[in-house]
Every structure is written in C-alpha cells, then in structure tokens.
Amino acid sequence: MRLIVYKIVVSTTILLLGTIGLHAQEHLLVSTASANGKNSIWLKWLDEQVLYPDGVNIYRVTASSGERVKLNSTPLKRGSYKVPDTEMKKDTMLIRYMAMIDSVKREDISGFVSLVFLVKMMESNEYAKYAGVMYEDEHIETGEAYSYEVYKLSGAQEVLIERSPFIKAAAWEPYPSPDSLEVVAGDGSVSLRWQYDTKRFWGVNVYRKSGDDSLFTPVNKRPVMLSEVPKENGTSALPEWLLKDENLRNGTGYTYSIAGIDYFARPTLFSGEVTVVPRDKTPPIAPHNVSVDVGLLDITLAWKHDFKSSDMMGYHVYRSKGRSEQPERINKVLLPDATFMYYDTVPGPGVFVYYVAAVDSSGNEGRSFAATGEVLDIFPPAKPTGLQVVADTGCIILTWEPNAETDLMGYRIYRTVGSHRDDNYVLLNARAVQTTRFVDSLPRNARNFFFYKIAALDRAYNMSGYSEPHSSRMPDVVPPRAPFIIDVKQETKALRIDWLENAESDLMGYDIFRYQPEDSAGTIRKLNVVLIKAGMHMFTDHWAEANKAYRYFLTAVDSSGQASLPSAAYDAKYQADEICALRIKKLSAAVKRSGNIPLLWSVEVEEEDDYSGCILYRKEGVEGAYKPLTILSKDHKYTDKFNDDIDTHQYQVRAYSLSGCVVKSETLEVKNKYK
C-alpha cells in the first residue's frame, strides 16, 4: 500500500484533531487501491470546511503524456453518491450519519461537530463518498504515474483545494504495524502504548486473547485516537498510556496485538504479540499497635493484627538506624501469621526504627507505622594502636592507626616532659582530633624529651584506655655563636691564628678559612682538613706566602652539624726576611672640573737593572676589587676620569722587580668634589 497525506486541515477546539495528522494547509490524501483483481487510485480531501455545498471537480494529469483530463461529468457533492444497500447493512449507523450531514448547514459545522464528521469520513469510505469528499479513479494503467487536482466550486468559479505529486498505479499493500508496542500488567488490568505515525494511520485497534484461546477479539469498540488529556494545572498533555484494559483475572496470561487504521479505513499489518500476566498488587491491611521494649543491646517488638485477609501468609520485620536510612528486612524467613512478637539484637548503640509488614500470597506487603527504640551508648572505643612519634624542626609529629568504631568522635592527645609518669600528663587538645595525625608545635631550641599517649573518644563521650606511651626529642637547630679571633702572629715562615674558645656544651670544633683581599675572584680556602676539636684555640698557617696579605675567619660547629656565622675577619701578612730594593714615593692626584684625574708617583730604585716597571690599579667605590688601569711600564703618571655614576675612586701603584719583588703603595682615595 502507498498512502500519501497532503495538507489536511481541520480547525477545531478539540485537541484530537491536531493529533491525527490534520495540520494547517494539509488537504488531500491519495492512495493506491486494489479490489476484485483490479487496481485503482483513491482520493480524499478533508479540511476545516468539511462540506462543499457547490461540489468539487477532479482533474488528472498523466506523467508519460502530460495529458490533463477532468474525471467527473457533474460536480461531486453531498448526496450525489448513492450508498449500496449492502454497505448500509454492514454499517447500521451509516444512515444516521447520512441524515445528520443532510440536515446540517455548512455554517453550523465547527468544533466537535467537525470532529464527528471527519472521523466518520476516515472510518467509512462510503460515508466519505456520500459526503462528496472521496473519489475512486478506476480508469488507470498499472505502472503509469498520475497527479490529481481537486477544485471546489464557488458559483461558476473553480478554486484549487490541492494538487498531489505523481503517484504510481500499483497493487495496494498495507502499511507496517504501529511501532514500539509496550504492554505492562497491573492489578487486574493491562496498560498499552505504542508510537503513533499520523502519516500512516489515524487510529489503532487493540486485539486480545487469553489462556488457550486461539483467536483474538477486539478490546476497543472504536479506534483508539491519539489525544491529549487535561491536567490539574489547566494545561493538557498526551497520556502516559494510550489504553487500559481492565476487569481482568489476576494470574491469567493475556496476549495482545494491534493494527492501525489508515485514512481510507483499511487496517495496517498486525504488530507482534505480547503476553503479560496481571498480578494482585493490593497490599494486605498492615499490623498496628507496634511496641518496642529496649534492653542492653536487645530489642523486643510486639504488634497486633485484627484484620487478616484470606491470602495472608505471615510477617516481615524491617529495621533502619534513624529515619533517614532505608530500612532493611532483618528476618531471614517469613514469620508465621500467628506470630505477634520478634526479638532483635542490634549491632551497637543508636536510634533504631522498626516496621512490621503483613505479607500475602502474591508477595504484597502492608507495612505498619514506624516504632522507635533507642539503645544508649555505654561502651568505650578500643584504645588506639600504632602510635609513632617523630621529631622535626620546631615540632613533634604524632601518627597512629585509625579506630574502627562508627560513632568515633576523635582522639585526645596527652603529653609530659622529661620522664613517663601517668600523673604528669596534660591534655593538649580541647576538641577531639578527627584525623590520625597531630602536630605539637614547640620552641625550636627545646632540648627536652617529650612523652605522648593518646585516647579515643566516641560521640557519647565514652573514652578508651590510653595507648602505649612514646617519646622523642627535637633536633638541635640552634647553631653556636660566632667565634672571635684575638690575633694573628708571624712565626717562622708561617702565621698563627689565636681565638677565644666558644662556651657551648655541644660544641664539636672549628673550621678556619682565609682569602686574599686583592684576589678579584674572591676564592675562599678552608685550611683544616678535619674539624679542629673543641678546646683548641689556635691554628698555624704553614701555607702562607711571603709578602702576601691574607684575611682569616672562623666558624664553630656543634654536635648536630650546625655551623655558626663567620667570625669577624682578621687581616695579616707574612713578611719575608729579604727587603725589597724598591720604594714607591707618595702617590698624589688632582681633580679637574672636567672630571679628569691626573695622577703622579715616583719609584726609588737601588738597582736600575733590576727594576721592571709599575702598574696603576683602581677600584670604584668602597667595595669591589682592584683592577689594572695601565700595563707594566716605567711611566709614572696617568690621567683617569670619573664615571657618571661613581664619585669615589681608590688607587694603588704596584712596582715590580725582575727578581720577583713586589711593592705596593698606600691606597689613595679620590672623591669628585665637583659632583
């Protein structure tokens, strides 16, 4: 079958119209048909007007030739078609509908009246022909394609209702069944729903058979149409279930199948079969007067049940801890229906809520109102285990294994100093610690042994026994004070450094360092290979070179490896026995407004042949290292210049002999007095 729905319009206040495919500007339906071995094409035109008092004309266009012919000799209108007596006998209501449409005026057709007529026109082809809204084209060739035009007459003028696309003449085949059939059994009833496709069908018939029946019988008297139902808030919506089959026998199997009805009153294919069994879902009357008697961890329940149904089987008991939890059944097997008492042992303290449910043969339960009993908590938690105490800088960290109690509030931490005595411990935390870690902050220089023990606390303030005590002492993080060098004395080819001894009790010794102030790299050398032991107060530097300036400093080291700040530096020079035959006379300088600095100096030489020359050095500012301004030369003057951002220079002349003697002048500081 091919059914094409084109622009059917029905304007009505009834919501059903919008759900059967009749939407704005959709008028014409065209379908192939087959009867008595002969193919034909059927047409229906439906819209809000329902009737066409002046009638309609039908034109057909043949695809292969383009020929356009008028099919009807006289206008098709209400009453122009005579319904055969055989059809009148098949549908006894047809004569009433014919009388209704004969007597009604066009202007009176609206709302529910429109719906009544339109549904009947879709339900009965004979009625549609009588109403002048259907035509059967029997003069066609199978395989040829045709397009149809329907015009309504208004006086002598034709007005186009709709023009169809081309449809190929062929044998009619029914549409597939409605999709997604769902069938759900209830208590003495079955609910059905399916997916509507208003392009294929406008209504659905439901069929049922039960038990060993081999034939289906219809459930609904009229096709089920997709319609919205009113809601409490004043709006409307499609129902969740499209049909409910009631007054069924519980425990009996029912099989269902459905078929749609197309717009030419022909059934679609049948759906697959679905079998369901309605079940008794009405719960029995619930027990009443449920009472709770609380012991230590034992609870006794008692109840009454005066109205037992004939299918009553027994009782189930449910329990939850508090009202927020989902109750769980606590009896393993069904309690006999003559039982009115139950003994329960609870896992621990708390508020317990009980329900007693009557159970019938279908498994339905009638649950009582809640009954509550409270078991007081008088049981302390287990004492904590796994306590570990680890010292760190400025604190001691405690960790332990967590307790397993569900009502645990937390832990209390206790501490004592020096030695373990039970009566000397003090509580450290006002509020229970809820984790398994506690940090005890202490002064960084505290060197005492600290002892700890902990106890668990539950929400009823029951406290456990104490854990095993553990102790620790914080690491030494305070370095010794800086040493003080008293003097550096020259010995035979060496320099001896003397200092005051440190007084710390944990002092392990000293490290001694030196560097040369004139070394631009600033290389610092540690002189001792191993730590100079505490109690020593001198060190001899045998590596000092003659006529070189050195700067010495010390650090003290304690038993934790903490080193003190460096001592104040002490300058010293090892003077060689030989006297250098060079002498630099006073170095002088003048400052010009231009920023130039003329420098002059002279060198006295006992042996001219031994004199190699001199170099002028400068350092900018007070800090920094000397850097050469000149190359080795016997010229004794040089003009320097101030930089823009430096207003102080320091100068030094160094004279060199071929024999290796080096003589340094006094340092000359020059300031820019014009800046």
Image: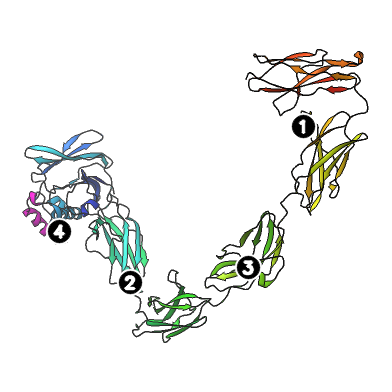
In the image, what residue type sits under mark 3?
Answer: Val
Q: Position of residue 266 (x, y in %)?
A: 24, 54
In the image, what residue type sits under mark 4?
Answer: Thr
Q: Nearer the viewer, mark 4 or mark 3?
A: 3
**Residue at coordinates 64% horizontally, 14% vertically from top-left?**
593
- Is 399 placed left or right of 555 in the picture? left
Q: CA distance from mark 4 to mark 3?
A: 110 Å
In the image, what residue type sits under mark 1?
Answer: Gly
- Is 388 placed left or right of 94 in the picture? right
Q: Which element carries disc 4, helix, strand or loop? A: helix
For the residue pair 494 and 451, the one nearer the viewer reads as 494
Q: Nearer the viewer, mark 2 or mark 4?
A: 2
- Which label is found at residue 426? 3
Q: Residues within 10 Å of mark 2 (few under 14, many from 20)?
A: some
Q: CA distance from mark 2 to mark 4?
A: 44 Å
Q: CA distance from mark 4 to mark 1?
A: 128 Å
* Residue 522 position by quadrant: top right
For the residue pair 471 and 199, the one nearer the viewer reads as 471
Q: CA distance from mark 1 to mark 2?
A: 100 Å
Q: Which element carries disc 3, helix, strand or loop? A: strand
Specify the segment rendered in magenta.
91-108
Q: Nearer the viewer, mark 1 or mark 2?
A: 1
- Which label is found at residue 187? 2
Read off the residue under disc 4: 86
Q: CA distance from mark 1 to mark 3?
A: 56 Å
